[in-house]
Amino acid sequence: MKAAVYDGKELSIKIVSEPKITDSQVLVHIKAVGICGTDLAIVKGSLPTPLPIILGHEFTGEVVAIGNNVEQSWLNKRITSEINSGIDFKCYYCKRGLYTQCLSRKAIGIDIDGALAEYIALESYLLHEIPNSISYDDATFIEPLAAAYQTFEMMPIDKNDQVMAIFGLGKLGLLITQVALSKGLKLIVIDGSDKKLDLAEKYGAQHVINRLNCRDIPLEIKNLTKGLGADIVVDATGNPNALIDITTSCKTRGKIHVKSTHGIETLINLTDIVVREITIYSSRCGPFVKAIEGLESGKISVKELISEKFKLDDIKKAFEFPKSNHDHIKTIIQI
Ligand SMILES: [Zn+2]
C-alpha cells in the first residue's frame, strides 16, 4: 500500500506492506487525515520520533476487517480513532481511568506508525463511530475538538471567570473559541491573520486584536478589562515567545492555560506568576464523545476551518502549503 513516510530527512510516498491485524485489532481503510502542527514539527525536526515513521493522527476511515476477538458490529462502520494506543489497562493511571496518560501508551503517528496511508491496524478500544451526518473530512476534527473540550475538563470555570483571551487562532484556537463561547465566556482573540480574526468574530468573539497592528497586546487587553487583565489566558500560538505577553495579559489570581506543544524550552516570568498568584493549567487529548456531540448538534462548526484538500500522492505539496499561506488553518489529505 501507499504511505507517507518520514525518514528523518524527507517526507515521501513509499510502497510498504499492508498491516496485518491481531485478534484484538481492526483493519481500517483510511478516508481522510488532518495535518496537524505536530506533523509539521516532526518533519521540521523539532519533535523527535522513531524513524522511519508513517505520520498522521487525526483521521477517519471505514472498518474493512476485524480480528477474532472484536465485536462483529464494528465491521463496515465509519470510524475515527483515539491516538493513544498500547494501553496496558493496569498501570497507576489506567487504574484511575486516565488511559490517555497510560505509562505504556504509544501515540499513533508520533511514537508508532500513523494514518497517512491506505490502511491502518487499530486496537478496537480506540474506535469511535462517526454519525452519518458528519463527513469523513469534517470528522478529522474530532480529535483536535476533543482536545479543545479538554481545556475545560482540566480547568474548572467559576463565576469569576468571565473574560478569556485566546492567543493564536490556528485550528485549535478556533475550536477553543467555539467551545468557550458555548460556555458563555466573553472572548478577546489575538492573531496575525485578519481572516482568522474575522472568523472568530463571526463565531461570536467580542474583541479581536491583530498582533501585527498592536504594539502592546497586554495593555490592550487591560484596557478591555477595567485595567485588570483577562480572567483566563489560553496559549494556542505554538510560539514560545508569546508566553511573556500571555502572562502579562492575565489578571492577578487568574488562570493561564497552555495548549501549545512548543517542542523547545520556553522562557516564562515565574516571579510574576508567584507574586500575582496565577495558576497554570495544561491539557491535551480529550473526550471524543463530547466532540462528536458538538459536531453532530451543529454547536461546533468546522467546514470553514478546512483551507485546502490534497490527495496522498501530493503529500509534499500539502506539507509546504501552510508555510506559504498566512491565513492557513487546516489541510486535509483525502486517501
Ligand atoms: Zn496503563
Image: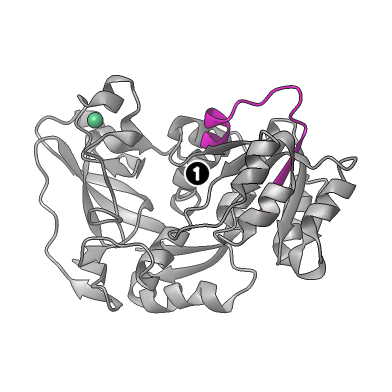
Q: Residue at x 44, y 60 (%)?
A: 264
At which x and y percent is residue 182? 69, 33
- Foreground pick, 208 / 333: 208
- What residue do we see at 88% from left, 43% from top? 227
In the image, taking residue 47 as reference, residue 248 lies left or right, namely right
> Closer to the camera, 247 or 163?
247
**Residue 163 placement: quadrant:** top right
Is 212 situated above or below 297?
A: below
**Relative to residue 127, is residue 202 depicted above or below?**
below
Give ligand 1's quarter of the image: top left
Q: Is residue 55 left or right of residue 247?
A: left
Q: In the image, which residues are magenta?
A: 149-169
Q: Quadrant of the C terminus?
A: bottom left
| Element at label 1 | loop
Towards the viewer: 24 or 99: 99
Residue 265 appears at what percent x and percent y? 46, 58
Q: Would residue 333 be found to the left or right of residue 256 on screen?
A: left
Q: Position of residue 160 (x, y in %)?
A: 76, 25
